[in-house]
Amino acid sequence: MNEPDMETKTKIRWSEYNKEIANDKFFYLRSCIRQNFNPGAEKVFLSILQNKLGKEVYDDPHHTTCSGIGYHSDIVPFETFQTMVARQFSLMTERGYKNCAVSCITSFGGYNEVLSTWKEFPEELEKTRENLLKATGRTFEIPENLSHACDIIYKFRKEIAAQAPYRLINKETGEPLKIVDHIGCHYAKIFPEKGVGGSEYSRVLTGMIEAWGGEAVDYPERRHCCGFGFRHYLIKNNRSYSISASRKKFESMQPYQPDMILTNCPGCNMFLDRWQYALAQIEGKVYGGKNGIPVLSHEELAALVLGYDPWKDIGLQMHQMDVEPLLDKIGVEYDPKLKFTGVKGQYINEPEFTGCLARTD
Amino acid sequence: MNDLSFLKPASRQIDFDNFDDRLLLYVLQYEPSFFTCISCGGCTATCSAGNLTNFNVRKIGLWLRRGETEKLSEEIQKCMFCGKCTLVCPRDINIRNVILLIKKRIAMLKNENSPA
Amino acid sequence: MNNKHVAVIGGGIAGMEAASVLARQGLKVTLIEKQANTGGKLNDWDHLFPDFSSPEVLVNSLATKTKDSGVNTVYNTEISRIERAGKRFELRANQDARFYADAVLVASGFNVFDATIKEEYGYGLFGNVITSVDFEKRMKKHGQLHTIQGTDPKRVAIIHCVGSRDAKVGNTYCSKVCCITGIKQAIEISEMLPDCEVFCFYMDLRLYGSKFDSLYLQAQKRHKIQFIRGRLSEAAERADKSIQIKAEDTLQGRPLRMTVDMVILLVGMEPGASTSQLIQKNQMTVDENGFLKSANVHCARNQSTQEGIFMAGTAICPMAVNETIENARSATTEIIHFFENRRP
């Protein structure tokens, strides 16, 4: 048989594809965006793992940014990026862990890119080992399993459902809540085999929605980028590109009147939340809900159904879009007056207004 | 309130669901041979104007099909009506007439749009 | 030569044509068909390109020819092994049936590409995404094309090269007949529903047949079919069950979005499911595309790499109906030469 001139792929149905997700003993790698804009999300993720699922997870104060945003903006060279990633792995090795739990989608894609590079080009791994040793005196092992935080929530979605006092069901009507998902591009578009269900039909978020009683709504621009795109956003002149991409998504989901948007990426979460406000200011248009569509991440939604306090535990007051309509539909008990109070009950200040447009009433 | 005017939400995408077909329908009515264009580019290769400027006759046809009226009205000014494109067309389209019809229709639309 | 026995595997048009020609030459011929009737995939087809003729007429005339020439046709029998037994061949079937032959002709045909593998096109997920095979079946059964909502489609997109020329699904070859099938189906839709806009999304239009280009011209001129050079990247269902598709308009160099009521995927041909079984226990091999390999692509197209086993039709490579029949006839010539040149 002649060798074909083109490399061909195996015929697999990605929607049936399952990836390996570690079961326990995670080394946590935080997200720059998530811990700055939605710090409650990461805190409550650790709590879910430790207190609800009985898992061991280590949150190392010595770890740094992965520098992925700098790498994707052509500021940090790939060599430096590899060394940064190697340092995270060396912290993991030092603490005796073998499984990484990654909070950020950019980092997740970056770690996978580095691991894949080391596999394909072993000389790069050797060079990185050398660089890290020279710079820090550290050595490292390659992790046995690298999962995104959403993979872990997905893996234990049924256990979470079993413990959850709330379901994603409209308390008034008894109908399942209509939820649209948005998967961060770097979750599976770079390496489809690293995503639950591959890249076209990632099941990672819809699996949670369905396990917790909601209805996952497919919308035409589901696979489209949120528009963050690093250099598209980081340079002010390019931000029209970024917001145009988000608008395309909002227009596409609008006819389905979703009750919320579920994301797995910290960047997407922020942009889908904040751009709704910006578009309302520019065009005077609100794409859903009374004053915008709530945007939650996988940890935040898991925490919500598990009965964590929306303000004190999950920090949902950090979102521009009001989450109260969603809380009311689910029937979550909360005190509206405590929205802008901190963990110790102190007033933490508040924005001029929340949602898309200032209420006139 | 922050000034967000520097953000201009728009798309480069060709939106087939909302396109202006007023030029296209007019051209097809009077020069139905245009239907058979296969974008081979023979016209562009022989075009006198295209040898001197970045004028592209093949793209005129494409823009016409996609309803890009604004782009067309500027670009069409570069044609010198020599008719060489019509001579080489393998589908025997009267391209010269297509260009004439576009010009004519654009002028009509301008009159329609301007206040009496 | 008259006492020689030829077993023909597959009762599609190639098998029927070859069997009847061989029988008329005085050979003993057994035609073995896995289904309950002959005709193969053409039994589901409504009209043929390029003349819009009925495949039923063709299949019936071949069946009559086969019967009249004295071919022994065996139904519901699927051959799983062809083994050499001395100078002859032993053929084993699924239910322990055995056949013996001096020469074998494999006319086992092709498989239709399973469009659910191309997941981003939404076949099997969205009711308004169908294949070219579904189109023919519907037209044959109902004589009309409706959306899943029961309405007349106002805009239809026909997608070329689905499962062909696509390394992602493991098929890098061209299935050859899809381009002209798409144009034929576009014309049929336009004749049936004059208000319906039809778009063909293509990478290259490969209209190799002598009458194919005139059909292309006719599609543009008379039926206003629009051709967009760009490969579909994804299809997604909208709230009203219409389908949003995305492609690049490559001639403009810009992305394009369009909402259509129906999408028709022109699915390609793949090697027959039984091919991998049939090449076991003998010297037959497959080519780089997985179809049965010819001893020589120019002068021994119908000879397999196992002496005494011949091939005809789409078991060799994708072919149109008329080519398949010509190819079947050429196979019979090779078989007759084989017997004539063979020392007793």
Image (tube, coloured by chain):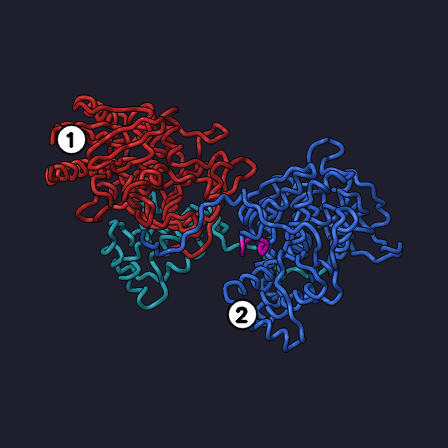
Residue drawn at point x = 20 percent, y = 28 percent: C29
Q: Nearer the viewer, residue A355 or C43?
A: C43
| Identity of the residue drawn at 19% across and 25% down | C65
The label nearer to you, 1 versus 2, is: 1
Is C260 on the left or on the right of B101, as rendered? right
The kind of residue on which mark 1 rests is: Lys
Residue C241 visible to an observer of this rendering: yes
**Image coordinates for residue C293, horizontal then vertical, percent:** 27, 46
Q: Residues within 10 Å of mark 1 (few under 14, many from 20)?
A: few
What element does badge 1 sit on? loop
Give the SS element for disc 2.
helix
Q: Are marks 1 and 2 on the same chain?
A: no
Q: Is residue A126 above or below residue A51?
A: below
In this rendering, is residue C80 above or below B113?
above
Q: Amino acid at mark 2?
A: Glu
Q: Which chain is red?
A: C
Image mark 1: chain: C
Q: Is residue A108 left or right of residue C179?
A: right
Q: Residue furthest right?
A: A345
| Residue at the image position 30 percent from the left and 44 percent from the top | C176
Please state the extent of the stretch shown in magenta in the rendering: A185-191
Q: Which residue is mark 1?
A: C4
What label sits on residue A124 in the rendered view? 2
